[in-house]
Amino acid sequence: MDFDTVPRRNRLVATITLALTLAACSGQGSQQQDTQSMKPAPANQTEPAKKGKPVVYQVFTRLFGNTNTNNVPWGTREENGVGKFSDFTDTALTGIKELGTTHIWYTGVPHHAIVADYTEYGISLDDPDVIKGRAGSPYAVKDYYNVNPDLADDPANRLAEFEALIERTHEHGMKVIIDIVPNHVARQYESLSAPEGVSDFGANDNTTVEYARDNNFYYVVGESFRVPEPKDNYQVLGGHPHPLADGKFDETPAKWTGNGARAAQPDQNDWYETVKVNYGVKPDGSYDFPTLPDDYAQKGVEAHAEFWRDKSLPDSWYKFRDIAFYWLDKGVDGFRYDMAEMVPVEFWSFLNSAIKMRNPDAFLLAEVYQPHLYRAYLNKGKMDYLYDKVEFYDTLKTIMQGSGKVSDLVAIQEAHGKIAPSMLHFLENHDEQRIASPDFAGDAEKGKPALVVSALISRSPTMLYFGQDVGEDGSEETGFGDPTRTTIFDYAGVPAHQRWMNDGKFDGGQLSDKERALRAFYIEVMQISASHPAMNGEFASLHASSLNNDSEYSEQQMAFVRYTGDSRLLVVTNFASQTRKLTLTVPEQLASELGLNSGTPFDALLSSDVSATVGESGQTITLELGPLESAVYEF
């Protein structure tokens, strides 16, 4: 989610003397769920046994294939170019797959409000006064039943072009995720492609009242919408002329704004380009729908689906269920839910159980930023995964910047307990600063130890953002919002990524030696994450036990073991910019459980010529790591 005016958001052999002896169906407006089958369909029995864990590759779709390097601030589509679905060629998809990718999250696919003129295709003009940037925010969806016309070679054939991309992605052994944004839609929502009998959001609302259960929106009765007063010299489209850029937008009565602002004239820092969707939450915060009993946190999706089957529910619930079913039927394999915490957990129980009844393997990832809500949205809301942003990512970022402590990160990981495998890890996404940006770490190399920790510490999925693997720094001033984050609002080229793209060859032909080496490192780490069986095993930290020995091990190093059955990994990483001579202390009970003995050499899975030695007792391991260096050993 990013609506703020300034967006927030080598296989080498090494000697290691270790030995382990352990050898529901669509129907808009329907007031009950489909009941033809309350049991999940059988999983695909032809898929190989799972070894590693999911790797999500987030790509900002309109930027990925763009070869134009102009980057004119507030530049038009013609000036700055735009990527297309067709840019995801077999070669491009192979390059994405190299990173261990199991799921591609194609960000910005649903048709959202944009400034470009597509009236010749029957698409109404959007008003730039309620659009952020020239290309528009992907989180102000205008038509949930079609895709962004900017992404198609032939806008009239845009849906078929995306369906072809879904098929190509599947042919390369990866699954497809797209966004669903249930909390809000574009102010000018208008679906040209909705199935017969499906009405637009708000089309049947009673606009004479602030709230009604089956209204899709909330209303400021008796007042018309007014465009926010500009701040800090802000000008729509950077001051470039446009026939509709007149400081006005016709909306009577005014609707509540997407972030819940109730004024007819929202603030410029509000999500003014969107309107809040009503899920039966009254203005006083009370619920106009049945609440979910607490014991449903321990029940499966079948029980959840059965609970909602005969309930009368707000219209917006059914609208979004039908949208999800529409995309599942087109081959989409899952969804990333924007700002899920702003929608009641009961709705997620309803929607996700319905999705899982139709596709039990659907991948459901949600953006939830309040840690006290994590368990509710996982257990009651039936999410598969949540962003581990506020705790894990934020702490890891401070460690990369030199101010944080590894002990805090270990504590967070261990405190998550049973939900740890459901907390998706990342270092970059469209909301966050690029690692190489000056405001974050200033150097992509500083992300290397963090990648090792983030990707290998847990059974949770890992997410990469396109360009991260080649050190993109987000330094371009392209229009709406400030640099450090790659723009999601304007047309742009992404320079480091474009060097890997190499005019559509996708072979890294223009990368510097440093960028090429960084990508090779990412590939190695992510292949371990995606394919090594220890990734689905247990985690044991060696951090606290190693802090108090006489070596240079400190809060700038992290060591842990991942193990399952007869598969073992030792992971050691150095966040410091200096070489460190380390002794790892293995607690006696863990050493005994792992059967640690001296005398047997093993392989380094991560490119390294670092050798490690186990002491005679099996309770110490010594090694030396260079600046920002990591070692991963297979036991």
Image: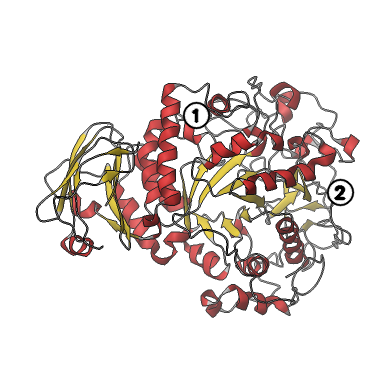
Query: Which of the pair 406/102 is nearer the observer?
Result: 102
Secondary structure category for the residue under label 2 = loop
Q: Crowdedness of circle 1 by 10 Å Cα count: few (<14), some, many (20+)? A: many
Q: Count how many numbered circles sit on residues in the image.
A: 2
Amino acid type at mark 1: Asp
Disc 1 marks which residue? 473
Give the CA distance from mark 1 to mark 2. 38 Å
Instruction: Identify the disc placed on residue 401.
Output: none
304 lies above or below 555: below
Where does residue 207 sit, x and y in percent of width and height? 85, 59
Query: Which of the pair 240/82 is nearer the observer?
Result: 82
Disc 2 marks which residue? 192
167 lies above or below 507: below
**Residue occupying the point 34% across, 42% down:** 399
Where does residue 349 sit, x and y in percent of width and height? 62, 69
Secondary structure category for the residue under label 1 = loop
Mark 1–mark 2 CB contact (< 8 Å)? no
Determine whether, in the image, residue 442 is placed left or right of residue 509. Answer: left
